[in-house]
Image (tube, rainbow, N blue to C red):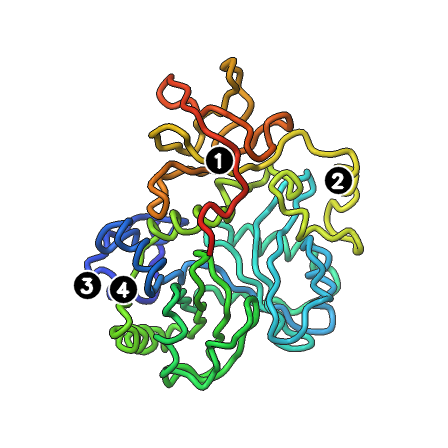
């Protein structure tokens, strides 16, 4: 299958990015080094091109009903210009995808989904669209830049009339940005370093990217790849679809009970409600290594007797902490904070302990 290219593919190649296949797209994984890029975002400001993400518009009098049916969170609570984190449950207790729901207007919503799941999510939501909500897949027309870091608001201030410094978390505004019209600027993020997502039409992407790089120069802005994005999100304990959550993990096992609202009917709600009442057998935990070692996805988690109690889903050497950290599912006896566990790395059981994410405090 031929790799899809984001609108600014050639720009990233010209910036010296190492390009790799990711979720069916040719994507920049790093420009300099993962650690350097990670620190740029934690300490100053960086720009990620995440235009591979999917965007669906849902409109009309039945749009909210459809969203309520296919997502676990309660979208009726959303007001205009507010955003909600949610997930699409499947019929077997797992998760089709996690996503963001933007309420643009009374009968207009934007759903932002993971790149690897665009077609899957579209087909899934369409299957439940029995009341005739208007659906439009605009994924191929939209570029998305995540400008993240403590200096993000200052770096972008000259490009828009939107008061970025006072924008509340999980809200957005639509307006002019760097001379482009109808741009969505949202205060969300996947790094824990603060910042904004900028949604622009592909034809405006180059102009907006160049303007951000220019305005951000005095603040030390650098382009950042997917490598640092992964270590940044892991330091915050944020789930990555395909690693920490997937078609076989329940939102309750994954610690996403807070976005699973049983005051409405949604796909598989009865079974998930029963699971909540009975309790789950395993839970997603955060852990940090007590010995010098780097945990990786699919490594076994064992107890002191060497018995398997779970599996690592994400792991890395934390650039901020200088030690190994990870997420993984373990049986209930081992999910309490402070519990000693072991990660089996090349047939050696390395000591770790359960901690409550985020690993790095904001």
**Left or right of residue 24: residue 238:** right
Whole-angstrom CA distance, mark 3 to mark 4, is 14 Å
Whole-angstrom CA distance, mark 2 to mark 1, is 24 Å
Q: Residue under circle 3?
A: 14
Labels 2, 1: front one: 1
Q: Residue under circle 4?
A: 222
Of callouts 3 and 4, which one flags the residue occurring earlier in the amino acid sequence?
Answer: 3
Whole-angstrom CA distance, mark 4 to mark 2, is 44 Å
How many circles with numbers are drawn on the protein?
4
Whole-angstrom CA distance, mark 1 to mark 3, is 39 Å
Of callouts 2 and 1, which one flags the residue occurring earlier in the amino acid sequence?
Answer: 2
Q: Which residue is located at x 36 percent, y 69 percent?
A: 151
Whole-angstrom CA distance, mark 4 to mark 1, is 30 Å
Q: Residue under circle 1?
A: 287
Of callouts 1 and 3, which one flags the residue occurring earlier in the amino acid sequence?
Answer: 3
Circle 1 Cα neighbour tier, 10 Å, few/some/many (<14 / 14–19 / ≥20): many
Q: Which residue is located at x 45 percent, y 68 percent?
A: 197
Circle 3 Cα neighbour tier, 10 Å, few/some/many (<14 / 14–19 / ≥20): few
Q: Establish if 45 lies above or below 30.
A: below
Q: Residue under circle 2?
A: 276
Of callouts 4 and 1, which one flags the residue occurring earlier in the amino acid sequence?
Answer: 4
Q: Position of residue 123 (x, y in %)?
A: 59, 53
Q: Establish if 352 lies above or below 75.
A: above
Labels 4, 1: front one: 1
Labels 1, 3: front one: 1
The residue lying furthest to the front in this view is: 338
């Amino acid at each position: 299958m031929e790799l899809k290219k984001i609108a600014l593919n050639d720009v990233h190649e010209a910036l010296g990015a190492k390009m790799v296949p990711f979720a069916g797209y040719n994507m920049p994984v790093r420009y300099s080094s993962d650690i350097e890029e990670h620190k740029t975002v934690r300490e100053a400001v960086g720009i990620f091109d995440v235009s591979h993400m999917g965007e669906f518009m849902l409109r009309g009098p039945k749009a909210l009903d459809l969203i309520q049916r296919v997502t676990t969170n309660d979208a009726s609570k959303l007001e205009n210009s507010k955003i909600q984190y949610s997930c699409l449950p499947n019929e077997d207790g797992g998760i089709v995808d996690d996503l963001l729901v933007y309420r643009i207007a009374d009968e207009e919503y934007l759903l932002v989904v993971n790149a690897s799941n665009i077609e899957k999510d579209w087909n899934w939501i369409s299957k439940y669209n029995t009341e005739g909500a208007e659906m439009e897949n605009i994924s191929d027309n939209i570029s998305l830049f995540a400008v993240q870091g403590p200096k993000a608001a200052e770096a972008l201030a000259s490009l828009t009339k939107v008061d970025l410094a006072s924008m509340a978390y999980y809200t957005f505004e639509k307006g002019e940005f760097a001379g482009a019209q109808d741009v969505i600027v949202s205060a969300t993020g996947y790094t824990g370093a603060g910042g904004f997502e900028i949604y622009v039409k592909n034809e405006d992407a180059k102009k907006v990217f160049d303007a951000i790089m220019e305005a951000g120069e005095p603040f030390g802005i650098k382009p950042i790849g997917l490598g640092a994005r992964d270590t940044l999100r892991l330091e915050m304990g944020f789930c990555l679809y395909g690693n920490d959550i997937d078609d076989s993990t329940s939102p309750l096992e994954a610690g996403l009970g807070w976005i699973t609202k049983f005051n409405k009917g949604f796909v598989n709600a009865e079974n998930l409600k029963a699971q909540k009442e009975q309790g789950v057998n395993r839970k997603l935990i955060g852990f940090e290594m007590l010995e010098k070692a780097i945990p990786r996805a699919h490594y076994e988690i064992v107890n002191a007797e060497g018995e398997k109690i779970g599996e690592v889903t994400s792991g890395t050497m934390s650039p901020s902490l200088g030690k190994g950290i990870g997420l993984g599912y373990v049986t209930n006896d081992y999910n309490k904070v402070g519990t000693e566990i072991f990660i089996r790395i090349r047939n050696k059981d390395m000591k770790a302990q359960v901690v409550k994410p985020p690993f790095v405090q904001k």
